[in-house]
Image (cartoon, helix red, strand yellow):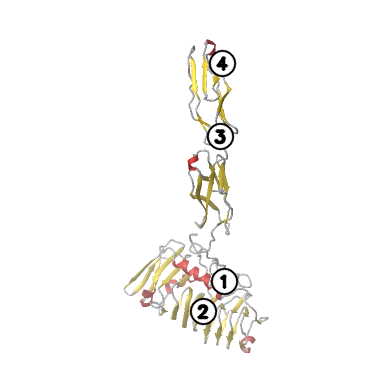
Amino acid sequence: MRMMNFLLLLLVFVTSHSTNAGKDDLLWPATNFSGYIFNDFNSGSGNSQRGLAVGGNLDIGGYSIGSGLPQDYSDFGLLVEGDANFRLGRLYKGKIRIEGDASGVSSSVITGFPVGVSIENIALENSISSSKEYYQEVSKQLAEAEVTGESKYQWGGLYLEGDCVSPVQVFNIDGVQFQFAHTFEFSCLPPEATIIINMLGDSTKFNSVQSKSMSSLAVHRERVLFNFPDSSKLNFAGIRIEGHVLAPNANITAPHGDLMGTVIANQWVGSMHLGGELFKGDLSTLVSFNERPFIESTPVTQVTWPDEYQYVVVATDPDQDPITYSLTQSPNGMMINPITGEISWVTTNITASSFGEFPIEVIATDDKKEFDSQFFVVRLDAPSNYAPEITSTPITESTIDTLYSYTVSAIDLDGDELSFRLDNAPQNMLIDAETGLITWHISNGDTGSHLVKVVVERSRYAAE
């Protein structure tokens, strides 16, 4: 097959999506939280305006969660897959579920829970840590997206200009240039555009995101996504990140600053303020988890000459995408209906010397260009007995008072003896049963057209 089967399921946690959700589902459920961390989350103080989802252990003190959530919010404000140590702080809104040891949640924190909320010390319905692979694939596909904007590094600054019209603006930024630039400025971004900023470079060359103004992105922040596909280590400090961060492989240290949207990362250490902005961008044209169709029918692999070969290819697409069928390898004359998948092959034109095995490959392709192929071999067999075949061309004109003469020639591939007879003929026309010689003495009364039918036959078959 051409692309990896990447079967990844978008995880949905416990309850339905919040009614405050943005328009894009490809980053859910992570964007229901301010922080979505696959491993440990550690902070000596700080706050998340929305919830936290932690795939490892939680260790926080002097930390508030959910202060920016709406009053009627009923989903989870805190999910922890490992152990939780919540020494001081408050959960303002939402429920709390801890899969591991919950004894580290202090009594003062419990006292401050929303009315009616208590710790659910049971397993998460879906693993946060296991969803990392999904977000890694999203990050990878975004990094491979076609660039629409232009990035210029000049005069010690980074100046990025969109194309002014596209609904999705994609920029690729050299992380080293960003790290040393004193200016980070955007222009020509349509008001409702989704803005993807691919920050490229591994952590040995680029690991610092700090001390820059992102004010030109402030009005777009709900549709801005900073993507770090290569980073394993990042340091956020002294910066206000106007957007959301996707860094599925990165351990992030963030002692201070502001991140206005959601951060999706491997690990988090620090007190950077995590905002409550929901992601409202549209990634649907850049990221796809389309599954390929698969051919489930069993091919017909034998046909006897002169029968017509037929086989209906049946394929199923898990996404219900339309399927088109085609042949990439086949004998001459074989055809396939691109809509129904029916393969047909008239064998009468195949000579006996060509009988044998014919390799065939059929492709079932969906409208996203994903495909499945089926290779098989069809054997064309000779019949148990061939019908004889007349090979001569008849003489169709003669004159009065002459002897009409025509010898019928025929062959039989089995070498059987043949006999000839007239099935329809004018009066007095004769045929030699062994040689096939037709004779007829033509008189004045025989003028005009006459239908003649000659049959050559042996024990089982006849040819006319």
Residue type at numbered disc 1: Pro
Q: Nearer the viewer, residue 407 or 124?
A: 407
* Circles 4 and 1: CB atoms closer than 8 Å: no
Residue indicated by mark 3: 387
Residue indicated by mark 1: 29
Mark 1–mark 3 distance (CA, rounded to whole Å): 71 Å
Helix, strand or loop at label 4? It is: loop
Instruction: State the quadrant of the C terminus.
Output: top right
Comes first in the chain, label 1 or label 3 = 1
Q: How dense is the environment of label 2, judged by Cα within 10 Å: few (below 14), some, or many (20 and up)?
A: many
Query: In which quadrant of the rendered view does residue 188 lie?
Result: bottom left
At 57% from the left and 37% from the top, the residue drawn is 385
Residue indicated by mark 4: 428
Q: Which mark is residue 129?
A: none
Residue type at numbered disc 2: Leu
Residue type at numbered disc 4: Asn
Comes first in the chain, label 3 or label 4 = 3
Indicate left or right for 61 with 210 as reference: right
- Is residue 350 visible in the rendered image? The answer is no
Q: Position of residue 380 (x, y in %)?
A: 53, 44
Comes first in the chain, label 3 or label 2 = 2
Q: Position of residue 334 (x, y in %)?
A: 51, 44
| Residue at the extreme left | 155
Mark 4–mark 1 distance (CA, rounded to whole Å): 96 Å
Comes first in the chain, label 1 or label 2 = 1
Q: Nearer the viewer, mark 3 or mark 2?
A: 3
Position of residue 91 relative to residue 392, above or below, is: below
Indicate left or right for 27 with 96 as reference: left
Residue indicated by mark 2: 274
Q: How dense is the environment of label 3, judged by Cα within 10 Å: few (below 14), some, or many (20 and up)?
A: many
Q: Nearer the viewer, mark 1 or mark 3?
A: 3
Q: Nearer the viewer, mark 4 or mark 2?
A: 4
